[in-house]
Amino acid sequence: QVQLVESGGGSVQPGGSLRLSCVASGYTSSSYYYMGWFRQAPGKQRQGVASIGSDGSTRYAESVKGRFTISQDNAKNTLYLQMNSLKTEDTAMYYCAARGRRYSGTLYSSLTPASFNYWGQGTQVTVSS
């Protein structure tokens, strides 16, 4: 049973930083093609924030480029999202996701939620003065 558990969310002022973590259990980092971070604000669709491929390649949404960094520690089966220079518009529930190697669903892009088949429960990030 694959399980993804996020942590690290919280409240921060604009310009502040947070680091999100996602611990994966039930499989190893070699069992996926992509892992990613997504976010969903109230009343809005879930959107891709950043993703990392099994080859270490990364991709970011334009709105977070230069501010967010995705990384992973394979020894700990942990995915990270370092978020700097946070803005009020970054406020959302943040989700960790993985696309398993055996998943046969369509790969639209590594920032499209429908490309992923495993999801965590989310961690709330609130940026407010």
Image: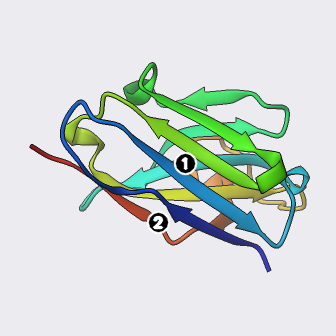
User: x, y percentage for residue 13?
Assistant: 18, 41
The image shows residue 90 at horizontal and vertical percentages of 30, 42
Q: Which residue is mark 1?
A: 37
Q: On the image, numbered disc 2 is attached to which residue?
A: 122
Number of numbered markers: 2
At horizontal 66% and vertical 43% (from top left) the residue drawn is 108
Amino acid of disc 1: Trp
Quarter assignment of residue 27? bottom right
Instruction: Report the residue that reaches farthest toward the left.
Output: 129
Image point (29%, 34%), residue name:
86
Residues at marks 2 and 1, CA–CA distance in whole angstroms: 10 Å
Tell me the crowding category of disc 1: few under 14, some 14 to 19, or many 20 or more residues within 10 angstroms, Cα based: many
Q: Is residue 51 left or right of residue 43?
A: right
Identified at 89% across, 56% down, the residue is 31
Q: Residue furthest bottom?
A: 1
Q: Marks 1 and 2: in contact by CB < 8 Å?
A: no
* Image mark for residue 76: none
Please identify the quadrant where the C terminus is shown: top left
The local secondary structure at tag 2 comes to: loop
Residue 102 image-quadrant placement: bottom right
- Amino acid residing under circle 2: Gly
Name the side, left or right, on which 87 lies relative to 110: left
User: Element under label 1?
Assistant: strand
Pick whichever, 25 or 109, lies toward us. Answer: 25
Pick the quarter of the image with the N terminus.
Answer: bottom right
Q: Nearer the viewer, residue 71 or 65?
A: 71
Q: Name which quarter of the figure residue 110 lies in.
A: top right
